[in-house]
Image: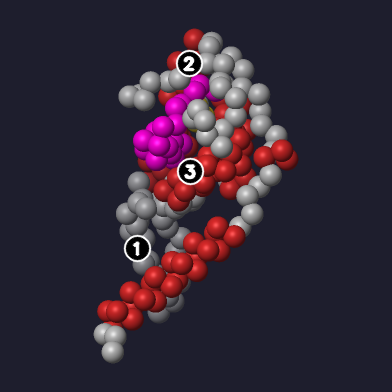
Amino acid sequence: MMRRGGLARAGLLASVLFVSTAVAAEPLPDPASVSVPTITDGRDPKIVADGWKYFYFWRADTTYAEAYRDIADCYRFLPVANADFSVPAFAPWTSTPNKHVIEPTYPGTYGLVGDLMASMVAGPIERRRRQSRMRRCLEPQGYERYPAPEAQWEMIIDNYSPASIVVQAKLASGPPPDAEALPSNR
């Protein structure tokens, strides 16, 4: 007779097998139907200097299927879009006696000026969070980073949409870039 822990483990194993089978059964997008932006100016000193912000990955002898699997796997670690993990703001209950009408108050955490300043730096901070997680996931697997101009990088990344996985996989498994790899310590 199985104990409760054994049943829970068996159920967990069955659900993992079901999910992994469902993912494996999902067809791989056709690389021939994917249009990839042409990466130019990879040796331009200004583009190389901005390579810590705008880059793409490439690995020698990688198939499209391997690159797709690796990049899709790394997308699991990206921060959830529009998730605000800040401390909740204090919003006082203000009412007049016997009327119980809530007067509007500013619900921001850091005040109006603080929230305005935070919104100015939120984009670059979010970009760095996503990029660092992709680097920590792909660089140990042998992928190298190559510089890209900002406009082309935005077409590749496409705000980290699921469609961008296909584009990045095609680049990562494509012909060798016409640029020097960026150092992994930056």
Foreground of the two, 38 or 116: 38
In the displayed structure, would residue 11 be above or below residue 108? below
Question: Within 10 Å of the Cα at label 1, are there few (<14), some (14-19), or many (20+) other Cα atoms?
Answer: few
Q: Which residue is mark 1?
A: 92
In the image, what residue occupies the spot 71% across and 38% down? Answer: 32
The residue closer to the viewer here, 168 or 123, is 168
Q: Which mark is residue 180?
A: 2
In the rendered image, residue 56, in percent from the top left (x then y), is placed at 51, 29
Labels 2 and 1: the sequence-earlier one:
1
- C-alpha separation, residue under disc 1 versus residue under disc 3: 48 Å
SS at mark 3 in the image: helix
Compared across the picture, whether 113 is left or right of 155 comes to left
Read off the magenta span. 126-148
User: Which residue is pictured at 34% across the width and 63% down the height?
Assistant: 92
- Nearer the observer, disc 2 or disc 1? 2
For the residues labelled 2 and 3, the Cα–Cα distance comes to 22 Å
Q: Principal SS element in the magenta part?
A: helix
Picture quarter with the C terminus: top left
Separation of marks 2 and 1 at Cα, in angstroms: 57 Å
Q: Is residue 70 visible?
A: yes
Q: Secondary structure at mark 2?
A: loop
| 2 and 1 marks in contact (CB < 8 Å) | no
Q: Name the spot of residue 61 as percent of width and height, x first.
A: 52, 30
Q: Counting residues from the N terminus, which is met first, the one under dot 2 or under dot 3?
A: 3
